[in-house]
């Protein structure tokens, strides 16, 4: 068995049947080594989001295998996939996905509450992560009181809260201006190194491609490592 943190082998995913069928993924195979950041690049409709959903256990492939941190996702039931997403895989979305009525600190602490972490341990981890993303002074502010870039930083901190092995980000700078997007991309690069997490980031941004350890291109469902 390889030392890959993520191993995708012969994955196919089709939506619909007959002439109207959409072949979103076609015989996709690649490995991602631990502690690296991969940029997943392709046009809209190329299969990027479908691939991220399959890798993170949000969708199941029609055939092929996905192994994350030694776990074959094909052998997991829905409870097992939920456990995987709580403990080993975290997501960062383009739309931030923060809970409006909670403060920045409370949003970051949500995964730790779900994991039933001790309050003192939870508070310590939340404070460390908000400091890591440069928001130590904004802990009590709610999402509506923060800029888009600050909200995405909170989302990154929340994604790291439970110390995931794999971080999946789908166009994380898509709603940010160029300068803010650059800062968030540099932050992602930094947290991969400081937290030892493996990241797969779907992006159109050439700066993110330059910051990544590796670029995987996808077109019409086919991936070229």
Image: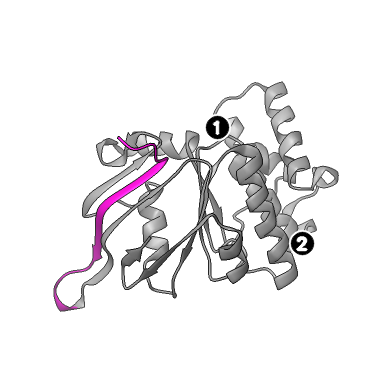
| Farthest-out residue, right | 137
Could you say where residue 25 lies in the image, as x and y percent from the top left? Answer: 29, 63
In the image, taking residue 27 as reference, residue 161 lies left or right, namely: right
Q: Which mark is residue 54?
A: none
In the image, residue 97 above or below residue 162:
below
The location of residue 129, given as percent across then percent down, is 71, 39
Q: Which residue is at the far left?
A: 18
In contact (CB < 8 Å): disc 2 and disc 1: no
Mark 1, other Cα within 10 Å: few <14 / some 14–19 / many ≥20: few
Q: Quadrant of the N terminus?
A: top left
Q: Closest to the observer: 64 or 61?
A: 64
Taking the image as shown, residue 126 lies to the left or right of residue 43, namely right
User: Residue 195, percent across and down?
Assistant: 62, 38
Give left or right: position of 183 versus 11: right
Q: Which part of the image, by quadrant, shows the C terminus?
A: bottom left
- Pointer 2 residue: 147
For numbered disc 1, what is the local secondary structure? helix
Whole-angstrom CA distance, mark 2 to mark 1, is 27 Å
Residue at 80% of width from left, 49% of height from top? Answer: 141
- Does residue 151 sit above or below 111 in this rendering? below
What label sits on residue 114 in the rendered view? 1
Residue at point 53%, 37% (across, down)? 164
Q: Is residue 171 above or below residue 91?
A: below
Mark closer to the chain start, 2 or 1: 1
Residue 158 visible (yes or no): no
Q: Is residue 218 visible?
A: yes
Q: Nearer the viewer, mark 2 or mark 1?
A: 2
Q: Is residue 94 one of those drawn in magenta?
A: no
- Magenta segment, which residues? 1-19
Residue in the image at 63% along x and 69% along y: 175
Q: Quadrant of residue 66?
A: top left
């Amino acid at each position: 068995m390889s030392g890959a943190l993520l191993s995708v082998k012969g994955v196919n995913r089709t939506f619909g049947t007959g002439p109207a069928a959409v072949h979103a993924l076609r015989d996709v195979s690649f490995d991602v080594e631990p502690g690296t950041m991969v940029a997943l690049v392709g046009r809209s409709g190329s299969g990027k989001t479908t691939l991220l959903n399959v890798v993170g256990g949000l969708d199941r492939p029609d055939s092929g295998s996905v192994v994350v941190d030694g776990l074959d996702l094909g052998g997991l039931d829905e409870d097992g996939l939920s456990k995987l997403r709580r403990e080993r895989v975290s997501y960062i979305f383009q739309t931030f996905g923060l809970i409006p009525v909670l403060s920045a600190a409370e949003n970051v602490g949500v995964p730790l509450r779900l994991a039933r972490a001790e309050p003192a341990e939870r508070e310590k981890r939340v404070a460390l992560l908000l400091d890591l993303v440069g928001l130590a002074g904004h802990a009590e502010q709610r999402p509506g009181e923060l800029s888009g870039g600050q909200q995405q930083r909170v989302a990154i901190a929340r994604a790291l809260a439970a110390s995931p092995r794999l971080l999946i980000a789908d166009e994380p700078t898509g709603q940010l201006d160029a300068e803010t997007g650059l800062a968030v991309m540099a932050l992602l690069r930094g947290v991969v190194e400081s937290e030892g997490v493996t990241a797969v980031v779907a992006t159109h941004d050439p700066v993110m491609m330059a910051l990544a350890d590796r670029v995987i291109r996808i077109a019409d469902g086919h991936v070229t490592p």
